[in-house]
Amino acid sequence: MPKQENILIIGAGLCGSLLALRLGQRGYKVRVIEMRPDLRTVDISAGRSINLAFSNRGLKAIKLVGLESKVASLCIPMNGRMIHDTEGHTFLSNYSGRENESINSISRELLTALLLDEAEALDTVTIEFEKRCTKVDFEAKVGCFEDSVSGAAFRVSADLIFGTDGAGSSLRKSYFNDRKFLFSFSQNYLTHGYKELTIQPKENGDFKAYKNALHIWPRGDFMIIALPNLDGSFTVTLFLSYETGEYNFNNLTTPEIVTEFFQKEFPDALNLMPNLTDEFFENPTAPLGTVKCFPWQYKGHSLLLGDSAHAIVPFYGQGMNASFEDVVEFDRFLDLHNGDWETTLKAFEAHRKVDTDAIADLAIDNFHEMKDHIANPLFQEKRKIEMALESEFPYEYYSKYSLVTFKETIGYNEAMTIGRAQDKAILSLLSARKIDASENLNELLKKVQKETSEILREDTIAKTLDY
Amino acid sequence: MPKQENILIIGAGLCGSLLALRLGQRGYKVRVIEMRPDLRTVDISAGRSINLAFSNRGLKAIKLVGLESKVASLCIPMNGRMIHDTEGHTFLSNYSGRENESINSISRELLTALLLDEAEALDTVTIEFEKRCTKVDFEAKVGCFEDSVSGAAFRVSADLIFGTDGAGSSLRKSYFNDRKFLFSFSQNYLTHGYKELTIQPKENGDFKAYKNALHIWPRGDFMIIALPNLDGSFTVTLFLSYETGEYNFNNLTTPEIVTEFFQKEFPDALNLMPNLTDEFFENPTAPLGTVKCFPWQYKGHSLLLGDSAHAIVPFYGQGMNASFEDVVEFDRFLDLHNGDWETTLKAFEAHRKVDTDAIADLAIDNFHEMKDHIANPLFQEKRKIEMALESEFPYEYYSKYSLVTFKETIGYNEAMTIGRAQDKAILSLLSARKIDASENLNELLKKVQKETSEILREDTIAKTLDY
């Protein structure tokens, strides 16, 4: 394979730094240019996405680049959802009925720093910061940049340009604005935004709440969640409508109203957050958007990867995992087509698009599940049945959540198709009282499998006629 | 109601001219500004969308403005699809099993001219041409224009601005670019494009093919269709992939290849088109895109309507009908909220968006139906059953096509929900051999209704949990 190609990667976030590391390991000459300052030397967290969920699909990528043990030391396992009601009562709902299946809370900053260190340690990789991409001439394979310190403009030519510059990608904007081809594109916002807050550790550094869970306070149309950090703190995120409901981001304008809202809805959390109102007004409120587009590549010259190709809402904990899986899949297509960039890029995007569309839709499903359904008795009965099935039949039964999160050998689209049919089957059987959680599990499994097959069969027939 | 408001309408196509007429009739002062020359004085057809399907939903709007009899004289009824195979054999597949249900072929130019004449005849309405909107300052309620003849720029202030400026709407672009609010937007292209061609009339002015049908030559991945015109000609449209398949727009580059393609696939049509190759290379190839967005309005100051809010692909024959129904629905919300623009606009967009999303999706379903499924035996058996049911039970049974096209008293979304469940039920029953076209129609109807209810019940349960 010809290794001398000059590769330009725009964006050194999680996806860009992992991609640089992998392409550098493969022997390509990689130049990475990032808009922001180097997060290893400057604190740029600014109250957004401090920690993230890291699970099986992301782990595939970390194994690919040989960083499994280094990453393990950054992880805090979360075995399930700790659900808090308005009285402060809690119960733990496991993510899986199988043993040893959990997701992890990980620091965006620490993980990115590790990937940057590892990439930069290679002779083949250079990384520059504080240089903003203003546009990409993808026909000529030239990236146009502006140095944020000096203000100087400069151009970078490459054999291949990757846009790993996130949801606001400059490469994607160039595709959209230049109109050199038919570019399908969507940006869709939820009516809700989010704001990050903090539960500080105890004075002795201990966690103020149960460490190994993702905490959720579901309230129907809004919620807070909390994920643990290595320093004993939790990062809390409030998801709330901008405009509707009694309390919303537009009317939470004074410390008194914010305190009243938390006192009424999240009293146990409020007790753990003495600095709530300061943080509330210091930290930004950010929108929740989904971006889809196609094609991702142009003539084998350039490729969108990660959030720039498919930004998703955070509710399945799969944003980083999906971006990391992009790199694993891309690496596999590189092997398949042995240096033919155009074939590699086209085959990759055609294969991968179906799965990233699926996780984008699944993530919106899970928004409703987390803020609302987990407090719904029918949903809870379904979860109870699924936990029992997974525990009794660990190899035969995977819930939708498990298919997406723990069965990394199948794609997101297959996980969605099977998982949704299974959910529909269980809910339909439950509501028709044809199954209940106390019956023989062998019988229960057979009924669920039969109803699921029937639903999948009907969907398949309808799909042959594209309905 | 205060009638003195100054209303600016950007775009005098079918939707803009109908809207101007209706608002003028209601007593508002309306200024319409159109980018193109006046089609009543200049031929601007340029080989695109010469005729259109006009049916019940569009008719509601024409009745609202009192033009039923004038429009009737422009209509050529089409009772069904005349399907042509590669041997030149044809069969007619009716659109409905009920009597007197048909769609119409109508000239875009003649219908627009009628609406412009009627609008301009009102004291309250003025229409200007060849003035291009460059952007809209929707915060300040100002439209910015450029006179295409003099090149002069000018600004127009209004109390309310409507963007009826089509799929490339300048108002919508201003919403997108100005980023004053979270604007959800999508543009999605099919892999196919289209090109318009002509079957000229006989020398005596007669039609060369059966007049009262929409002719289709379905070929799986591509097709041609033909709609009749008042002058005895048919407008033929070729729908074909840009890149894939043995013949595609990218490789149909010489008269010889074009003739070979038509000779092989559409020999009976080729016989009627002696000027095929001239037209083929003179007329443009255009893309097929779907545009969705939200919100359509801003603070009660401005509103997108018609294609600017929801451009759809042409395969359901509902593009104009949906835009006209927008005006009917908008008029109804005007009555409801009696001059309060902000409430009117917000209530209208919330109500209407669900239905225009549905027709956008239905139109893509129908692309596959027309080019492919109508030649499929399972689909044909379904159609046969549905024709029998509609004929025997004209008030009890409506096929999906009939719900969308002929049952204008329900919205597109309801038509889609019921119609898709019905299709799924019939296909599932047929493939399991639980029904056949020769059985007692009473029994057949009961089985279809029972299976449809079951599918809708399952969907409803799943939907309560947003799957």
Image (cartoon, coloured by chain):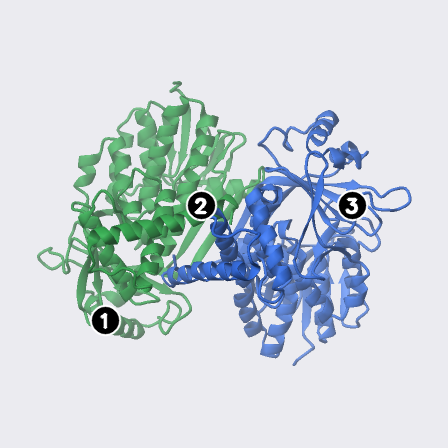
Chain colours: A blue, B green
Q: Quadrant of residue B126?
A: top left
Q: Secondary structure at mark 3?
A: strand
The span from disc 1 to disc 3 (Cα, nearest Å) is 68 Å
Disc sitting over residue A208 in the figure: none
Q: Which of the chains bears the disc numbered 1? A: B
Residues indicated by labels 1 and 2 sit on the same polypeptide chain: yes
Please name the residue shown 48% across and 44% down the image: B293
Coordinates of residue A38 in the picture (x, y in percent): 79, 55
Q: Along the line of sight, which residue is nearer the eye, A460 or B301? A: A460
Q: Along the line of sight, which residue is nearer the eye, B52 or B78? A: B78
Q: Along the line of sight, which residue is nearer the eye, B141 or A337? A: A337
Q: Secondary structure at mark 2?
A: helix
For label 2, the crowd category at 10 Å Cα-Cα, with few meaning under 14, some 14 to 19 and many 20 or more, is some
Mark 1 highlights which residue?
B86
Coordinates of residue B4 in the picture (x, y in percent): 39, 20
Please name the residue shown 18% across and 65% down the image: B90
